[in-house]
Image (tube, rainbow, N blue to C red):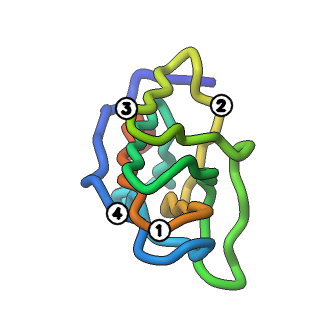
Amino acid sequence: MRGAGFRKTSAPITIAAANTAQTLYIVSAGGTATRTAILRKIWAYSAVGNAVLQIGSGLAAAWAQGIPPMLVINGIENIWEDVDTPDLELGVNFTCQSSVLGIIVQIEVEEIGA
């Protein structure tokens, strides 16, 4: 995927309800052109047991999975860097959901566009 944008990090969020999408990162508004964000890094931590983490877009019935589900292993920092992170470029907000509540998730994206 293309690059040379600005790297930004989401605030860490804690999954409040199992299998319910939550907003993870809000893509900045562009000037005259559409701005997109490329997923570059994922950090997840669980102290409540192993969990399946899904990242995509949309909330409630409009939720759409963007990358394959990932296993978050209990008790360790689960980090997926640039080379490990599946390609995902969105022009809308990033959302996530997990199979259990209490998972802490944070991502780093590269925003492209005006």
Residue situated furthest bottom in the rendering = 61
**Inter-mark Cα distance, 1 to 4:** 8 Å
- Which residue has dot 3 on it? 77
Pointer 1 with pointer 2, Cβ within 8 A: no
| C-alpha span from label 4 to label 3 | 14 Å
**Residue closer to the observer: 32 or 12:** 12
Query: Which of pointers 4 and 3 lies earlier in the amino acid sequence?
Result: 4
Report the Cα–Cα distance between label 3 and label 1. 17 Å
The residue shown at (62%, 57%) is: 56
Label 4: which secondary element: strand
Chain-order first, disc 3 or disc 1: 3
Residue tagged by mark 4? 14
Within 10 angstroms of label 1, few (less than 14), some, or many (20 or more) residues?
A: some
- Residue receiving disc 1: 101
Residue 82, position in %: x, y? Answer: 50, 20
**The disc labelled 4 sits on which kind of residue?**
Thr
Q: Nearer the viewer, mark 4 or mark 2?
A: 4
Closer mark to the observer between disc 1 and disc 2: 1
User: From mark 4 to mark 2, how far is it between C-alphas?
Assistant: 22 Å
Q: Amino acid at mark 3?
A: Glu
Instruction: Measuring from the top left, give residue 6's x and y in whole percent.
Output: 31, 33
First in sequence: mark 4 vs mark 2: 4
Which one is closest to the eye, mark 1 or mark 4? 1
Give, as a three-letter code, the residue at label 1: Leu
Give whichever of discs 3 and 2 has the lower sequence position. 3
Viewed as shown, does residue 18 lie left or right of 105? right
Where residue 71 sits, quadrant-wise, is: top right
Which sits earlier in the primary sequence, circle 1 or circle 2? 2
Contact (CB < 8 A) between labels 4 and 2? no
Q: Is residue 26 above or below residue 83?
A: below
Residue picked out by circle 2: 86
Question: Does dot 1 land on a helix, a strand or a loop?
Answer: loop
